[in-house]
Image (spheres, grey):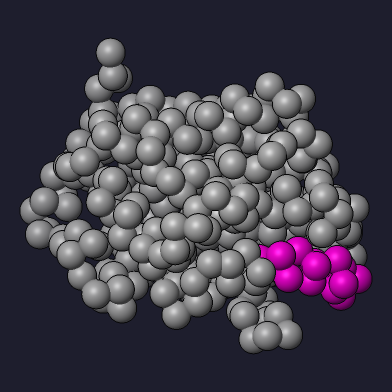
Amino acid sequence: MTSPLHPDCVALLEMIREMGRPRFEALPYPETRVLYAAGPKVLQPPPPEVADDRRLALPNGVALRFYRPLGSTAAEKLPCLIFVHGGGWVVGDIETHNHLARSLANLAGCAVLSVDYRLAPEHPFPAAVDDCADAVRYAVSEAEALGVDPARLAVGGDSAGGNIAAVLALMARDGALPPLRHQMLLYPVTDMAQTHESYVRFTDGLPLVDATMRWFRGHYAPHRENWDDWRASPLRAASVAGTAPAFVLTVGYDPLCDEGRDYASRLDREGVRVTHFHAADLLHGVLTMSKVVRPAEALIAAAAASLRDAIQ
């Protein structure tokens, strides 16, 4: 039996209906970016204060946003989370996820390097992976200037960002990136084939449904031959053994639910320490909706606590 949807989520869906908000897959992608960028004003509380919020850039011009947690001093060498925002690889940026990145910095007591990776369809797979991998390397090469400890790095992200974070953890396992202490996968995409049963369960009535995910995939990875590539589908990697300890969040009302649960189970089977948190009564994207969906704050705190334990 499916858990009833949380009352705050029911209220959110009613608000979306009353606003007449169009579906992403019904719009040209430039318009979806404008629509998504307007969301935080309605769905997120004011961003918490932090000790430092700096704009930086990778050598290729990709923007970064660097935070140090409230209460930290410039002299401290902090652990660092490389954070990858969600948005189906097509929408979202370091502004839409400012509240979440700041919250994680403060609650985990770590620096956060948020990556404004290049978006599809202008920059399809694997451009986003390449940019985020470069951000991990940047955190090491610039560790002294940033005041971070290169031996205490983590990666994390939500949705499409969780997909990329899982890939980065595999790359670090294989020596293509510096070692990582933790991977934080928040309702991640793990399989581009989109054949899990939860895609059949959620075809209507939610902000993210199967058609939305096909629309995102069509922009990011339009060529079927890329779907088996573990850099697009980490669930299809030959092995996930030896990757960093993981926190995996899944939510019940989400077409990505089953592939996220499968990835957590596979990590566990292959000897990776994993904390899997399943919120059966919540919907996809909840972490960037905490002004309206109040349980989101507890989920952010749980993810931050796991991160803190891993890297402090």
The quarter in which the C terminus is drawn is top right
Q: Residue at x 38, y 38 (%)?
A: 195
Q: Residue furthest top?
A: 1
Look at the image and give the residue range highlighted in magenta. 132-146
Please provide percent x and percent y for residue 41. Answer: 33, 64
- Asked if 86 appears above or below 190 in the picture, the reply is below
Please provide percent x and percent y for residue 169. Answer: 72, 48
Residue 307 seen by the camera = no
Position of 150 with respect to 116 (left or right) is: right
Residue 226 seen by the camera = yes
Q: Residue at x 20, y 70 (%)?
A: 27
The quarter in which the N terminus is drawn is top left
Position of 310 with respect to 15 (left or right) is: right
Within the magenta stretch, is there residue 137? yes
Q: Residue at x 53, y 29 (%)?
A: 262
Pick the front one: 311 or 227: 227
Position of 64 with respect to 90 (left or right) is: right
- Asked if 60 appears above or below 16 in the picture, the reply is below
Please provide percent x and percent y for residue 203. Answer: 21, 41
Q: Residue at x 45, y 72 (%)?
A: 120
Pick the front one: 189 or 183: 189
Please provide percent x and percent y for residue 156. Answer: 63, 50
Pick the front one: 259 or 157: 259
Position of 149 with respect to 187 (left or right) is: right
Q: Quadrant of residue 254?
A: top left
- Main secondary structure along the magenta-highlighted residues: helix
Within the magenta stretch, is there residue 68? no
